[in-house]
């Protein structure tokens, strides 16, 4: 398939979506979009208070991200987006933005995720919400275009693996 494609780097908070996404975007020469920047303030406040988001909370955010993908598609540009994309229904919304939206799931153990969250400074997501994200997470199904990356790999190793698994050049 030719034309633009859009890679969504997904996973729970603390998996390293931004780090991996920025490294992949730099490697490919594509823009990186930080999905968290599109959350309405009400979502940020809710998470900062330790309250998990509902599907209704996430819907406007996901549609804004799908619009971002659609805008890049309309300009003929490929893109890399960092977004948790925890459920297939969320990924379906993102896929509505363009014909070729692919996913890279950065995944690791609960212990490693918890350790990262407990040592991360300056982020609105409190570590105590990790279990709610893990409970919500629906791994990529076999019919979804994407691949899983081990968060234990270095960002450079993840990029090499992503390029290989998705056939990117």
Image (spheres, rainbow, N blue to C red):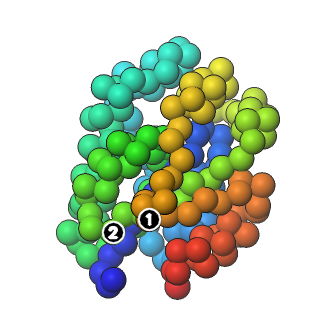
Q: Residue furthest front?
A: 142
Q: Give the residue number, with chain letter if any, for mark 1.
A: 145
- The quadrant of the picture occupied by the N terminus is bottom left
Q: Left or right: where does residue 116 sit relative to residue 132?
A: right
Q: Residue 108: image x %, image y %?
A: 71, 47
Give yes or no for contact between labels 2 and 1 (Cβ–Cβ under 8 Å): yes
Q: Residue 129: image x %, image y %?
A: 60, 23
Q: Name the one closer to the observer, 167 or 118.
A: 167
Foreground mark, 2 or 1, reads 1
Residue at 66 percent of width and 72 percent of height: 161
Q: Residue furthest left?
A: 74
Q: Which quadrant holds residue 6?
A: bottom left
Q: Name the one closer to the observer, 126 or 152.
A: 152
Q: Give the residue number, with chain letter if any, for mark 2.
A: 100
- Neighbours of disc 2 within 10 Å: few (<14), some (14-19), many (20+): some
Residue at 45 percent of width and 72 percent of height: 30
Q: Left or right: where does residue 77 sit relative to residue 106?
A: left
In the structure shown, which secondary structural element does the residue marked by tag 2 occupy? Answer: loop
**Distance in Å between CA atoms under marks 2 and 1:** 9 Å
């Amino acid at each position: 398939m030719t034309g633009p494609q859009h890679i969504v780097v997904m996973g729970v908070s603390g998996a390293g979506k931004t780090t991996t996404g920025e490294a992949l975007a730099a490697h490919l020469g594509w823009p990186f979009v930080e999905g968290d920047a599109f959350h309405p303030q009400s979502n940020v406040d809710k998470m900062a208070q330790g309250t998990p988001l509902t599907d209704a909370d996430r819907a406007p955010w996901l549609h804004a991200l799908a619009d971002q993908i659609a805008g890049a598609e309309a300009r003929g540009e490929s893109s890399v987006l960092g977004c948790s994309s925890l459920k297939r229904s969320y990924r379906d919304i993102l896929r509505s933005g363009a014909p070729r939206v692919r996913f890279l799931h950065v995944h690791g153990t609960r212990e490693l995720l918890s350790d990262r969250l407990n040592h991360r400074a300056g982020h609105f997501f409190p570590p105590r919400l990790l279990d709610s994200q893990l409970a919500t997470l629906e791994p990529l199904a076999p019919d979804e275009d994407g691949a899983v990356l081990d968060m234990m790999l270095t960002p450079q190793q993840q990029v090499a693996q992503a390029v290989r698994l998705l056939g990117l050049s």
